[in-house]
Amino acid sequence: MTFTHRHLLGIEHLRPEEIVTLLDLAEKYVTLNRSAEKHAEALSGLTQINMFFENSTRTQASFELAGKRLGADVMNMAMQASSITKGETLIDTAMTLNAMHPDLLVVRHPHSGAVDLLAQKVNCAVLNAGDGRHEHPTQALLDALTIRRAKGRLHRLNIAICGDIAHSRVARSNIMLLGKMENRIRLIGPPTLMPAGIAEFGVEVYDNMAEGLADVDVVMMLRLQRERMDGGFIPSEREYFHRFGLDAAKLAHAKSDAIVMHPGPMNRGVEIDGELADDINRSVIQDQVEMGVAVRMAAMDLLARNLKDVRGAA
Ligand code: NCD
C-alpha cells in the first residue's frame, strides 16, 4: 500500500502517490454514499472521538457521518475553546481521552501546531480537522477530488486562490497539495491579507482580480477570517466586495469553463456574489461538501488499516 502514515496531520507530509491513493479510495466512497445502502465495515468495532475546540458545522458533521457510515462508534466531545487555552490543558484532555482507548481522534484547534503536539501524546491515529492558520488537510483533499472530477485531471491547471490568504489554513494546505501535483497557483488578494514570504511557495501573487483570474481553470474563494484578525485588514466589506469579491463580471476573465469553489461558511456579498455561489453551471460548492464525506471516509479507512498493522506488530 502506498499510504503508510499513522496520522493525517497535514498535506506537508504526503507524497503525490499517497494523495492519489487516498483520492482513488474516496471515489469508491462517493459511489457508496450515492447508493441506498451506505454502510461499509472499514471502521467496525473502532472508536472515533471528535474534539472540536473551535466552532464547526460542516467539518464536524462530515467527520461524524464518515465515521458512522464506516461502522465506527463515534463520539462528539463538546469542547469550549475558552476553557482550554493552554497547551498543558490540551495535553491533559488528550491523556484523559487516550485512557479510554479511542482508535481515531479528530481534532480541530485554534492554535497552529496544537494537533501535532497532541498526536505525540496519544497512541491512536490523529486527524487534523484544522489547526489555527496552519493546515486543514481533509479540506485540501476534498478540494482536490472536486477539481479532479470537474476537470478530469489534477495537474497542469491554472488555479487562483483568492482573498484572505494570510489567515487561511485552507489556502496553506491547498497551496501545498496543488503544488505537489504540479499545478500553477496564483494568489489574489490585498497585500494586507498576503502572508510574508509567500513567494517562496512557488506561487504568483496578484492584488487585482481581473489580472489574476485571466485564463484560470479554477477559482477558489476564501472566507474573510475575522476571528483571526486583530485590527483593520480591509477598509470596509463593501469596498472589499467591489475589489476582491467574486461576481459574474470578474469571473468573465477566467476560462469560460472555470469552476468556482468555496470551503464554506460563505459570506454572501462579501467575498462572493450569492447568485454566482448558487449557479450550478459554475459553482461546485455543493460538490465540495459531498466530496468531504467521501474523502474523510477514505482518510480514516487508510489510517485504520495502518493502526491494525502498528498494534498487531506490537
Ligand atoms: C474552513 C476552516 O474552518 O478552516 N471551513 C471549513 O472547514 N469548512 C474555512 C473557513 O472557516 O473559512
Image (tube, grey):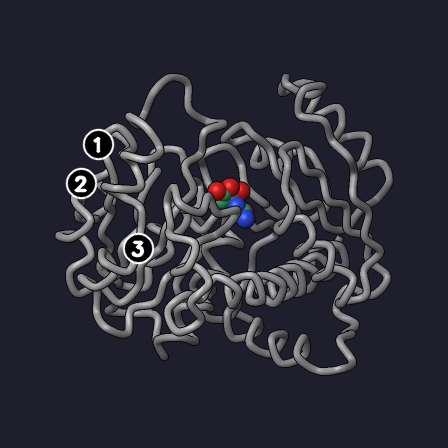
Which structural element holds mark 3? loop
Residue situated in front as seen by the camera: 245 or 58: 245
Q: Is residue 189 visible?
A: yes
Which is nearer the N-term, disc 3 or disc 1?
A: 1
Q: Position of residue 246 (x, y in %)?
A: 31, 52
Mark 1, secondary structure of its residue:
helix
Q: Is residue 307 above or below residue 162?
A: below
Dividing the picture into quadrants, the one containing residue 240 is top left
> Residue 12: horizontal and vertical position, in percent?
41, 48
Residue ID at (44%, 47%): 268
Residue pictured at 60% horizontal, 33% vertical = 109
* Disc 3 target residue: 247
Q: Position of residue 119 (x, y in %)?
A: 63, 38
Mark 2 and mark 3: Cα distance apart in space? 16 Å
Q: Earlier in the sequence, mark 1 or mark 2?
A: 1
Most distant residue in the left direction: 211
Residue at screen point 67% across, 46% down: 106
Q: What type is the residue that disc 2 sits on?
A: Asp
Q: Quick check: 186 left or right of 54?
A: left
- Quarter of the image that includes the N terminus: bottom right
Is 190 situated left or right of 112 in this image? left
- What residue is disc 2 on? 207
Q: Which mark is residue 191?
A: 1
Alpha carbon separation for disc pair 3 and 1: 21 Å
Q: Nearer the viewer, mark 2 or mark 3?
A: 3
Q: Secondary structure at mark 2?
A: loop
Q: Is mark 1 within 8 Å of ligand 1?
A: no
Q: Are marks 1 and 2 in contact (CB under 8 Å)?
A: yes
Question: Contact, CB < 8 Å: mark 2 with mark 3?
Answer: no
Q: Observer-nearest residue: 35 or 267?
A: 267
